[in-house]
Image (cartoon, coloured by chain):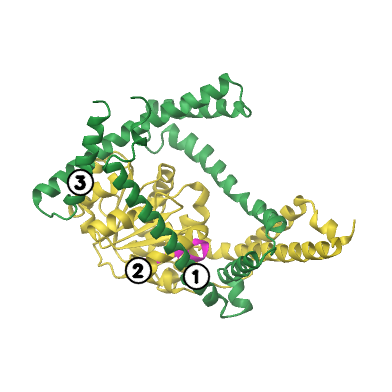
Chain colours: A yellow, B green
């Protein structure tokens, strides 16, 4: 068996080890490749930045722990941005598995800015039904969520006296790992109630969002870890936060992981064509 | 009668809801509000049906000792255990459902599943991503440019690479996605009309 044949039959454990080393290395010793800010992330940032203080940003937490490394930094950066500008934050979710993640963000981020639960931030929780939930929230949020995630009646929360339906919300970001997600907010929230929607999605599903960006249905897009990192950079650049930026830190690892895959594809193709030519 | 009544309800509600969308009168809006409540109630029944169907499917697998039947035991134990924990101690923060099942079981399992994808993707890309045809070569080049353009190292290699990746996503990708979306939407409209008009009756289930 020649060199190229052996290369084609390389033990996958070697590939796994190379990948593991190159992903871990930048986490221990950052390469400092730097992250800019793309127009899609800037559009989301500008939309949140234009919400008047005292008004509400709605964030739909539509992801599970599997997508946490990509999407959770978006949630945290969005909340920090809103709180720094005294914008209130209303959270809800279309994914049951996202409930604990939203709770974590509420309990960890709000105290950083001295924000009070019920006055500056409310987490509605999760309800089954997707389209029925969004349509119901369009008519009256209390019809869908009579109590919040923690069991407080919505009538007892000062913030919810001013936010009664989707039309009271100037902008929302749906952080989605799939379906249900931003497309449902567009279908029912945007088209029916004129809700302005931005999206945060995993890198693999970013391609699905582009048709909605061009039509203007989506105000902006945070695509994958890169989108999260861009938003973190924007938030820090405007002095809204000085906290650690997990997505920016992870971008070096992602860069090397992409390089590994590309190099492997090139080697695999060269080996394939060389062995095929010899076979003829 | 068992088939006629559901068909009649479907026809009437289908037409009424279509017309309702274009009528902003308070009666119309009130009716719409009422129907959204009905949807939530019907969704709750669907959940019961779904759980029942899941249990029956896995019991059947166990009885017939189908390949991988042991996983059905895990599924059923997880289902019953989660239900008992949730119904017994509630779903509020601090309850066992949150502290044990979500934080200590679901989060690490879910994160581990997704994390190992990177390794399998690298291995699969090495073995399967071949430029065997012109179309495959085109796909390979596009994937190459987008993968590099979406990470900071791409911009470090060539400053215009992120713009090229953005162009691929916002022009050829979007055109293809839009075509698929239009196809799906037209298909959904056609199917909806067939259901409303009683041409498509699969949703009624079997029997006479």
Q: CA distance from mark 3 to mark 1?
A: 38 Å
Image position, residue A231 (x, y; %): 44, 67
Residue situated in front as seen by the camera: A137 or B42: B42
Pinpoint the chain carrying mark 1: B
Confirm whether residue B44 shows in the render. yes
**Residue B113, which numbered label?**
none
Rendered location of residue B155, percent (x, y): 58, 76
> Looking at the rendering, which quadrant does residue A257 occupy?
bottom right
Pick whichever of labels 3 and 1 is earlier in the sequence: 3
Q: Looking at the rendering, in which quadrant would you find the C terminus of chain A?
A: bottom right
Do the residues at pointers 3 and 2 share their chain? no
Instruction: Give left or right: position of B196 versus A244.
Output: left
The CA span between labels 1 and 2 is 15 Å
Dot 3 falls on a residue whose secondary structure is helix
User: Looking at the image, which is closer to me, A203 or B105?
Assistant: A203
Displayed quadrant of residue B131: bottom right
| Same subunit: marks 3 and 1 | yes
B27 to A115, vertically: above or below: above
Q: Residue at x 32, y 31 (%)?
A: B45
Q: Which residue is mark 1?
A: B172
Mark 1 residue element? helix
Q: Residues within 10 Å of mark 1 (few under 14, many from 20)?
A: few
Question: Magenta segment, which residues?
Answer: A219-227
Disc 1, disc 2: CB below 8 Å?
no
Front disc: 1 or 2? 1
The dot on residue B15 is 3
Mark 3 vs mark 1, foreground winner is: 3
A278 displayed left or right of B150: right
Residue found at the far right of this picture: A1
Residue B183, horizontal then vertical, whole percent: 41, 57
Helix, strand or loop at mark 2: loop
The residue singled out by tag 2 in the image is A215
């Amino acid at each position: 068996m020649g060199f190229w044949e052996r290369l084609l039959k390389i033990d996958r454990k070697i590939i796994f080890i190379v990948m593991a080393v190159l992903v871990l290395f930048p986490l221990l010793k950052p390469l400092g490749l730097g992250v800019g800010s793309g127009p899609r992330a800037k559009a989301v940032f500008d939309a949140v930045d234009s919400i008047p203080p005292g008004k509400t940003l709605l964030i739909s937490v539509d992801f599970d722990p599997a997508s946490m490394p990509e999407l959770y930094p978006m949630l945290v950066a969005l909340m920090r941005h809103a709180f720094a500008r005294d914008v209130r934050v209303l959270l809800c979710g279309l994914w049951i598995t996202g409930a604990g993640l939203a709770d974590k963000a509420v309990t960890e981020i709000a105290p950083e800015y001295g924000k009070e639960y019920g006055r500056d931030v409310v987490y509605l929780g999760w309800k089954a039904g997707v389209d029925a939930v969004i349509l119901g929230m369009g008519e009256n949020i209390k019809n869908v969520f009579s109590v919040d995630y923690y069991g407080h009646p919505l009538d007892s929360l000062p913030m919810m006296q001013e936010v009664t339906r989707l039309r009271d919300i100037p902008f929302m970001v749906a952080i989605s790992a799939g379906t249900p997600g931003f497309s449902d907010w567009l279908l029912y929230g945007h088209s029916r109630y004129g809700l302005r929607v931005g999206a945060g999605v995993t890198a693999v599903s970013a391609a699905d969002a582009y048709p909605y960006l061009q039509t203007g249905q989506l105000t902006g897009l945070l695509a994958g870890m890169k989108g999260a990192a861009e938003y973190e950079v924007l938030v820090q650049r405007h002095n809204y936060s000085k906290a650690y930026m997990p997505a920016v830190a992870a971008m070096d690892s992602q860069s090397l992981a992409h390089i590994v895959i590309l190099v492997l594809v090139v080697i695999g193709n060269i080996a394939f064509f060389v062995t095929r030519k010899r076979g003829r | 009668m068992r088939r006629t009544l559901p068909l009649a309800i479907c026809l009437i509600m289908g037409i009424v809801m279509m017309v309702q969308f274009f009528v902003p009168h308070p009666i119309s809006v009130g009716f719409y509000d009422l129907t959204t409540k009905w949807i939530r109630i019907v969704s709750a029944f669907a959940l019961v049906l779904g759980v029942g169907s899941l249990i029956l499917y896995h019991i059947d697998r166990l009885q017939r000792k189908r390949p991988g039947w042991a996983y059905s035991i895990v599924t059923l134990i997880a289902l019953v255990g989660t239900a008992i924990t949730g119904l017994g101690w509630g779903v509020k923060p601090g309850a066992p459902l949150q502290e044990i099942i979500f934080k200590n079981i679901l989060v690490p399992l879910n994160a581990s599943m997704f994390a190992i994808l990177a390794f399998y993707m690298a291995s699969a890309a090495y073995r399967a991503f071949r430029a065997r045809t012109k179309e495959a070569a085109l796909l390979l080049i596009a994937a190459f440019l987008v993968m590099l353009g979406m990470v900071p190292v791409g911009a470090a290699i060539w400053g215009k690479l992120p713009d090229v990746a953005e162009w691929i996503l916002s022009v050829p990708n979007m055109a293809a996605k839009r075509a698929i979306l239009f196809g799906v939407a037209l298909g959904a409209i056609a199917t909806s009309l067939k259901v409303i008009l009683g041409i498509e009756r699969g949703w009624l289930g079997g029997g006479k």
